[in-house]
Image (cartoon, rainbow, N blue to C red):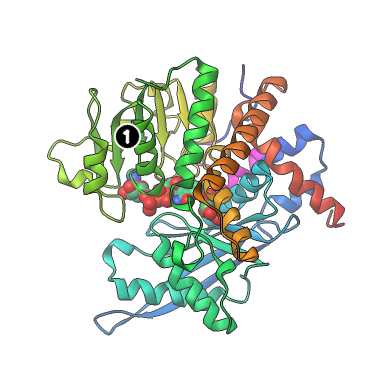
Amino acid sequence: MSTTIKEEKETASLLDSTQVVIKEALDKLGYSEEVFELLKEPLRMLTVRIPIKMDDNSTKIFTGYRAQHNDAVGPTKGGIRFHPEVDEEEVKALSMWMSLKCGIVNLPYGGGKGGIICDPRQMSIGELERLSRGYVRAISQIVGPTKDIPAPDVYTNSQIMAWMMDEYSRIREHDSPGFITGKPLVLGGSHGREKATAQGVTICIEEAAKRKGIELKGARIIVQGFGNAGSFLAKFMHDAGAKVIGISDAYGAIYKPEGLDIDYLLDKRDSFGTVTTLFDHTITNQELLEQDCDILVPAAISNQITKENAHLIKAQIVVEAANGPTTLEATKILTERNVLLVPDVLASSGGVTVSYFEWVQNNQGYYWEDEEVQTKLKALLVNSFNQIYEMSETRKVDMRLAAYMVGVRKMAEASIFRGWV
Ligand SMILES: NC(=O)C1=CN([C@@H]2O[C@H](COP(=O)(O)OP(=O)(O)OC[C@H]3O[C@@H](n4cnc5c(N)ncnc54)[C@H](O)[C@@H]3O)[C@@H](O)[C@H]2O)C=CC1
Ligand SMILES: O=C(O)CCC(=O)C(=O)O
């Protein structure tokens, strides 16, 4: 099957390449140019500067963003990233991918995303708390349980969600658990949210493996990134009888063809998903991606599989747990090589799905058992996978374009019904 994604300059920004695929999806579905004009950028983008008193008594000004792509379907929703490489264009693209994820799983949300340029690995707990609270104060006008609901992403976690929920509740002068998801269980978090992204990726791997005739038991898997998404995924794959032969973090990668001791690595990793620093013999992240394996899961950052290394990928299945790990050119190369690529907007949608369950529980004040969360998550994701796979087959497009076609429809329809276009 040939890909239909246009030739793109490899240097295109994440926003540019997202626009290319959204345009192509809308054209294939027969929507007008006006719909594309509406959806090609977030409706709202707030940039904030947050002064924080550091432990040495100096004041540092941090820059943060919150993008709200489209709220025709409902309030916007999406995580907050704390990372030195956060940038405005990427936050915009991330908010658009959130819209697509919510469309794919049929959640009553549009997409949002936030980020702060900072390196939490270099900050004390006190500095992190002050930064988390300062960010909420700075964006409080545009967020809320019926406006825009944040959640965790790279280098943010349930503790940070707890501080943010507490700050928002203080500002509004009432308890507001539905303001943010990914909270600790005792503050209205949901069973299953912490492992939800990896659970969703696991469901996609199971479905993709069936389509490729690969037995999961004994399959060789490489996972890039050992944080929330990557480490839970490695554990689930290991428990399912697959052989996890490589993992990585921001500092390097470890690779062992006989299989890694995942329980040991989980025990040793720190709260930022770092573990390779404990090993003498490491390879680079890029070298890891090129090692022989059956299934490759990028679960770290964007732009990892490019036209430079796509020819060197040995896996038959690539499942994108990370947001934006594969460029458009690389998508084309992998598809031409008959690699089954499960795109981020489908593969990583388990997180926002259970975040939605958390928000529903907060709104109801009635909490579900873990089993209920698991059953509902599985049903939604298997259905979404099948829908996208069938779209890809019947319309003869690659899985990314098929996912965009499924994901963009509800948002386009809702915008038209509202009379926006
Ligand atoms: N946490 C969630 O619920 C969701 C996360 N995602 C995506 O999954 C990916 C990973 O997110 P989390 O696991 O939540 O983050 P995390 O903060 O828990 O872990 C990040 C991992 O990536 C590694 N990393 C950071 N910078 C790197 C670099 N320059 N090169 C290689 N590795 C690097 C870190 O060492 C760590 O192992 C991101 O793309 C995120 O947007 C997608 C959907 C939901
Ligand atoms: O859980 C959420 O609401 C959003 C998760 C997220 O940021 C993502 O899927 O990229």
**In front of the other: 339 or 16:** 339
Which quarter of the image is occupied by the N terminus?
top right
Image quadrant where residue 9 sits: top right
Give the side of residue 26 with respect to residue 284, left or right.
right
Q: Position of residue 344 (x, y in %)?
A: 53, 39
Residue at (70% x, 56% y) in the render: 70
Q: Is residue 333 visible?
A: no
Q: Quadrant of residue 313?
A: top left
* Residue, far left: 280
Q: Is residue 214 left or right of residue 23?
A: left
Which residue is the site of mark 1?
A: 286
In-front residue for pair 378/171: 378
What secondary structure prevails in the magenta region? helix
Q: Is residue 383 visible?
A: yes
Residue 390, given in percent of the width and then of the height, sits at 68, 24
Which stretch is magenta? Answer: 9-21
| Foreground pick, 193 / 204 | 193
Residue at 87% x, 57% y: name it.
419
Circle 1 residues within 10 Å: few <14, some 14–19, many ≥20: some
Q: Name the secondary structure under disc 1.
A: helix
Q: Say which amino acid is labelled 1.
A: Gln
Q: For the point 33% across and 75% down, which residue is it?
A: 127
Magenta highlight on residue 179:
no
Indicate whether 351 appears above or below 58. above
Q: Position of residue 255 (x, y in %)?
A: 24, 30
